[in-house]
Amino acid sequence: MKLPELKIGSLTARIPLIQGGMSIRVSTSALAVPVAECGGIGTIGGSGLPVAELQEDIRKAKRETKGIIAVNIMYAMREFYELVMGSIEAGVDMIITGAGFSRDIFKIGAKYNVPIVSIVSSPAFAKLAEKLGAAAIIVEAAEAGGHLGTQTKLRDLFPSIRKVVTKVPLIAAGGITNGYEMAELMDKYGADGIQIASRFVLSKECSVSQKFKETYLKAGQDDIVLVSSPVGMPGRAINTPVVRKMNSGEDVSTKECKYKCLKKCSYRYCISDRLIRACAGDVEEGLVFSGANTFKMKEILPVREIFNRFVKEAESVYRENK
Ligand SMILES: Cc1cc2nc3c(=O)[nH]c(=O)nc-3n(C[C@H](O)[C@H](O)[C@H](O)COP(=O)(O)O)c2cc1C
């Protein structure tokens, strides 16, 4: 059966699939545009970018597609409001925000008529986000890549949030690798759509270095681990040499704070520096964020092929049994 569209505010995605935002410079317009062209929601990772660079990338994306372009900005960023306002000025269609909770963001969204989508990992924050005016809510579970707000797995967490969110679309995220799982989450768990990220790192269009992608391809299940982040949350990443050092308590801190990216930083190491290094190909000293199920994906595919497979697999089993 055909998958339903995903309506968020006044926007409609033909395919109920959001490409998760990935900082720093993992998901740029190079990835978001083909996703939007395929009928999903393409998300530029905005955290940790200079405002002007983010604006330029949003404008580029909006020139290249009529599809939906979102930006993901973490509340933990020092320049959160500047990045939000800069994105709106550059014409972004939607703002997705997590890693902390801003109440004011909903007022800004209402004022400028830009839907705000909240990423949450608990029923309490889901309820609050809906009450304050979120246009949709993403439930991000323990299998996700990057910063984690919970240790509860998706199929345990999602039902508790499904019960309390009644008015806006609810999206499932974390560890989804194929269309059968997409249909399962929509049919059996009542998700209105899914968000996936790691699958898109292994796309032709994702602009990270080949070494970053190879690290994904080589990872076995036990190579995907937790590491504490200076943001104050655990992060899920591949066990690269620097992660092994971090997890064995070695000092990997930097002498000076070059980026001043976070509102509150533990200064245990420089998260911006480590993410930028990995993206550029230094997978020895860089931090390669990854979802828990990356080890199941062994092919780099064009975005269109990823969509075709997801939709074909999902529609072969989707029955709308909500
Ligand atoms: C490399 C990488 C970077 C990420 N960066 C961010 C980010 O900047 N902000 C955010 O909210 N989520 C971030 N995430 C989480 C994703 O957007 C997504 O919700 C999650 O990874 C979904 O799980 P999956 O990767 O198993 O599909 C990141 C994930 C990865 C793999």
Image (cartoon, helix red, strand yellow):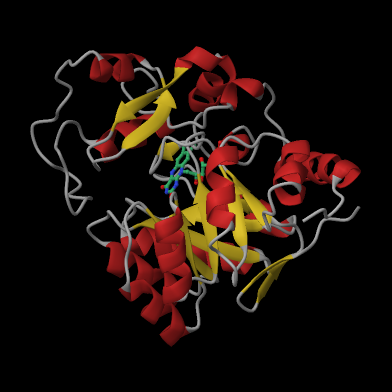
Tell me where residue 212 appears, x and y as whole percent: 49, 26
Where does residue 249 sit, x and y in percent of width and height? 18, 16
109 left or right, relative to 295 = left
Residue 283 pos. (x, y %): 40, 21
Q: Is residue 219 above or below residue 66?
A: above
Quadrant in the rendering for residue 229:
top left
In the depicted structure, whether residue 198 falls above or below residue 53: above
Q: Residue at x 16, y 31 (%)?
A: 268
Q: Name which residue lies at 13% across and 41% down.
A: 257
Q: Answer yes or no: is residue 201 visible.
A: yes
- Viewer-nearest residue: 47 or 66: 47
Choose between 298 and 49: the one closer to the eye: 298
The number of discs equals: 0
- Residue at x 30%, y 18% (from the top left corner): 242
Quadrant assignment, res 182: top right
Please identify the quadrant where the C terminus is shown. Answer: bottom right
Farthest residue in the left direction? 255
The spot of residue 21 in percent (x, y) is 49, 50
Nearer to the camera, 97 or 44: 97
Residue 43 in view (yes/no):
no
Q: Which residue is pictured at 8% across the width and 31% down the height?
A: 255
Q: Is residue 238 left or right of residue 311?
A: left
Q: Is residue 172 left or right of residue 284?
A: right
